Image (spheres, rainbow, N blue to C red):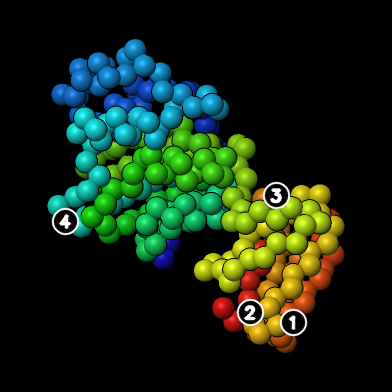
Amino acid sequence: MVKKIIILTLWVNISFAISSLELAKNLVNNSSKNSQLELLFSNNSYIDNNGNCDIAKISQILKTNSLIALTLSNPQSLRLNFKAKADEVMFFKILSDVLTDAGYIYFIPTDLILREGNIDYTIQVESQYVLDPGTLYNLLKENSVYINNIKRIRAYDYEYDLNFSNAVLKTNTNVNLNTPKSLEKPLKDYVLDLKNATNLIIDANDLDNWFPKIFFLDKNLNLIKAVKSENKNNHFSELIPNGAIYAIVSDMYS
């Protein structure tokens, strides 16, 4: 349950790229470790191919040198705050999927602030495991979302500044145009990329009972068209509506 929602009309958002050393210091948040961090990072720039800090490498170095501990002796209440300028639907879809894939299936949203397209979202998680910065970096990168900065505010309190400027939803199956592809029964909904496609044809096994539920979405995951069938239909065909970039394929009763 969201405890607080604030919608305001003014937001001043200025961000600057930080160095690997600065980011490492923010992750550790212990001034007594600064000398060691400077030895590790002052002469090394861990930057990925997109010009962002390679947080997977930085995190691994910190773990190897026992500068961050991600496994706690017992479960704690973790506060995770995420900030981004993003489309709201895209932000929550990607972040929810990423947190689930990172092992945070159950969490409580505690604060949400919306200001002129900027999102400030806080969740609370009961866990014995701190969110691994490298894992978060890699999962977000699959959606072309990058991390500008991570700050450890207190022992169990973290802030994440995210860059959604080039975000695209990660599809979980690749289907080439005009090429049939066999898919297994999914553990979760299929997400398909529809770019340059004009028609979506899906044939389920004749032994299955499929009740199609298909959502056609635009680039920001806004719903363009929903197709739902309460009757078994193992042979589905539908023209792709204008502006549709993604299709979410599922079953009415799954």
**Residue 93, image x and y in percent?**
55, 55
Return the disc, 1 or 4, that comes first in the chain's sequence. 4
Label disc, if present, on residue 74 of the rendered structure: 4
Return the disc, 4 or 3, that comes first in the chain's sequence. 4
Name which residue lies at 40% across and 18% down: 45
Reading the image, the residue beneath label 3 is 219
Tell me the mark number nearer the camera, choosing from 1 and 4.
1
Label disc, if present, on residue 233 of the rendered structure: 1
Q: Which of the two residues, 165 or 47, is positioned nearer the viewer here?
A: 47
Q: Are marks 2 and 3 in contact (CB under 8 Å)?
A: no
**Image height check: is 104 above or below 153?**
below
Report the Cα–Cα distance between label 4 and label 3.
Answer: 42 Å
Report the Cα–Cα distance between label 4 and label 2.
Answer: 40 Å
Q: Which of the two residues, 254 or 146, is positioned nearer the viewer here?
A: 254
Disc 4 is placed on an element classified as strand
- State the quadrant of the N terminus: bottom left
